[in-house]
Amino acid sequence: MPDHQGAWPLALAVILAATGYLAAARAHRWPRRRAVAFTTGALVVVVALLVPVRTATAHMAQHVAVGMAGPLLLVLGRPVTLALRRPRGRHALLRVLRSWPATVLVFPPVAALLDVGGLWLLYRTPLVTRVHEPWVQVHVLAAGALFAAAICQVEPVRHRYGLALRAATLVAAGAAHGVLAKTLYASDPALQPGAVVMYYGGDVVDIVLAGVICLQWYRRQSRSRARASAVDTPVTSARPAPRTPEASTVVQSK
Amino acid sequence: MAARGRSAWAGAAIGIGIAAFVDETVFHQILHWHHFYDRATPAAGLVTDGVFHAFSWFATVAGLVGVADLRRRGTLSGRALLGGLLTAAGAFQLYDGTVQHKLLGLHQIRYHVEITPYDWTWNVVAVLLLGSGVVLLARRRARA
């Protein structure tokens, strides 16, 4: 396993980002749970980058922290939405968000391919010995954040992709990650404990991502029901059979 | 009927999750009978197992949130939920015991023992779960 010296510029960048985030959150009445998510994510990434990595198992724990758990927490803090509240740079940021490369990158299968595909290249080809380690960490963090952003879709991008596509992508990416962990397990006995950490660590992050998607569905259900009962429009197929006159007056009086 | 069908589907999603969870905790982690990966598994077995593993976690979360939604509407049918749960758990275990373990040659139930009684027990339990689930669902339908 490569030595991970030289990760401090990335750690410093994450610390600066968290400082900027907290300053903006203070200025803009920002929900506390988002600030907690972002700060925790930044802490997870910084600690994982700076703690010395001596074994393959520690390397895999670092991979789960920098590439999966940390980015997910950062994304749940909705830093882009917060940045858009500030007038400075708002215009340029919006232009980036609405650009076609951004739209393609947050297409869930593309984000998943960049994230898990990158890992396959990294671990199953000789690439890992050739790339300078700090750049590997930058890629792992950026691709992890892109994947979490594409699956959660909580930031204002031009096109939002549907729940079914995001759920299917999550399952496919989770499967690819698990299979990669098992092939690593098979490739070298020294990697076995690390591969198990990678496998179950990936599971935990996948469960949280599944929770995010399913709770979005849950909220959408209650919103659409509220809309259906607020407006006395033709009944959709999901609703019960024709209402009695009494029932519809009750609904109208609400 | 629609609500009952939705209860059954939510139960099915949770049932797959429970079957996969029991497999993972009891046989992999506690008993250490199953191997994490016995290094003799062909690629097709690894991939289908990976997909099922990832899907089972998603199904668990989706099924639980589905139950929350049905409760909120007041249309949760406990019997349909249980029927769906048992049917799916049995079906999943039967699939695991026949296709995954035997046909695709994924890890076996236990190693260094005569495997036949283990396979039979595994699959008979699966059929019993599946059967009781189907009976529950069918009775429900007959009464409706």
Image (spheres, rainbow, N blue to C red):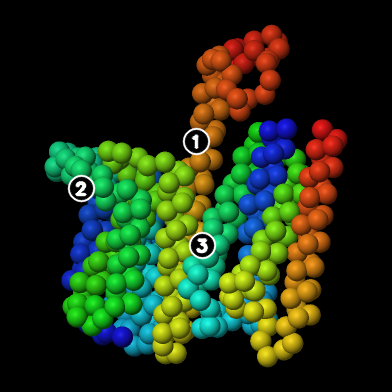
Q: How many marks?
A: 3
Disc on res. B51: 3
Name the mark on residue A220.
1
Please state if B129 lies on the left or on the right of A141 as rendered.
Answer: right
Asked if residue B29 shows in the view, the reply is no
Chain letter belonging to callout 3: B
Instruction: Name the secondary structure under disc 3.
Output: helix
- Residue at screen point 69% across, 9% down: A245
Residue A155 picture location, percent across and down: 32, 44
Residue that badge 2 annotates = A101
Q: Residue B12: in sight, yes or no? A: yes
Q: Residue at x 61, y 49 (%)?
A: B63
How many angstroms separate mark 2 from mark 3 (CA)?
Answer: 29 Å
Q: Quadrant of the N terminus of chain A?
A: bottom left
Residue B60 picture location, percent across and down? 60, 55
At label 3, the amino acid type is Val
Q: Relative to B17, is A34 above or below?
A: above
- Binning the other alpha carbons within 10 Å of mark 3 as few (below 14), some (14 to 19) or many (20 upward) gives some
- Horizontal side, residue A175 vs residue B23: left or right: left
Image-based side of B131 in relation to A25, left or right: right
